[in-house]
Image (cartoon, grey):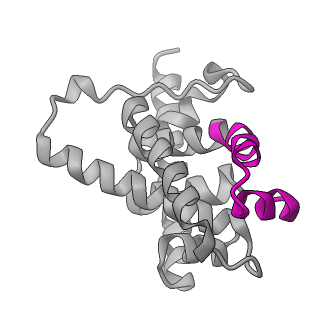
Amino acid sequence: MDTSLLKRIKSGDKEAFRTFYNQQIDKALRVAILITKNRELAKEATQETFIRVYKNLSSYDSKRPFDPWFYRILTNECNRIMKKESKMNYHKEYLDIDVKDSSHKTEDFSELNEAIQSLNELYRIPIILKYLKGFSEREISTVLETNQNTIKSRLHKGRSLLRDYLNDLEDRGKKHV
């Protein structure tokens, strides 16, 4: 994040926070949708994240990168909301995924998206943070508050599961041709 924008936000400049919000909302929402697998839950988590960021910005250490701090809050909110929702036992048909991204055609990535969504969240979240957000293993370990070697292991296992899933899809496609 731009340090001057951060200083303006910390000083209480609401317009600066609005600028930050407008810059980040689409990216944050896409990540939240991938984590929660539900657009409505993702919207709730994203809005709550921005509220928490605004309220807790004074605790942010500006000597450290901003994105891992922000995405740790987002990930925690997604997990909190999913936990709350799982207790309410919604019907499965309510949990539809809609991962439309205005900058990409979803059809181009439907198989990959399907493969990512099939992963257990232990592997899905690190994969999303690494390959869709570009975080390093160290940053992911900070976001998820997990040992860096554990993240490396989860990324390795996640990639392996993705490869297997996509190979199975390809094999099934060859059988139907």
Q: Quadrant of residue 21?
A: top right
Relative horizontal placement of residue 171, taking residue 107 as reference (left or right): left
Relative side of 155 to 124, left or right? right
Q: Position of residue 57 (x, y in %)?
A: 61, 66
Q: Quadrant of residue 91?
A: top left
- Does the magenta portion include 116? no
Reply above or below: 39 against 151.
above
Residue in front for this viewpoint, 90 or 151: 90
x, y percent for residue 112: 57, 37
Does the image show residue 160? Answer: no
13 on left or right of 79? right
Find the residue positioned furthest to the top. 177
Q: Would you say the magenta stretch is mainly helix, strand or loop?
A: helix
Residue visible at 58% across and 56% down in the picture: 54
Q: Judge whether 68 appears above or below 169 on screen.
A: below
Magenta region includes residue 11: yes
Front in this rendered view, residue 90 or 45? 45
How many marks on residues?
0
Residue 143 placed where, x, y %? 55, 70
* Residue at position x 56%, y 27% in the image: 110
Q: Nearer the viewer, residue 162 or 18?
A: 18
55 in relation to 25, above or below: below
Nearer to me, 109 or 28: 28
The magenta segment:
1-25
Residue drawn at 53 percent across, 14 percent down: 177
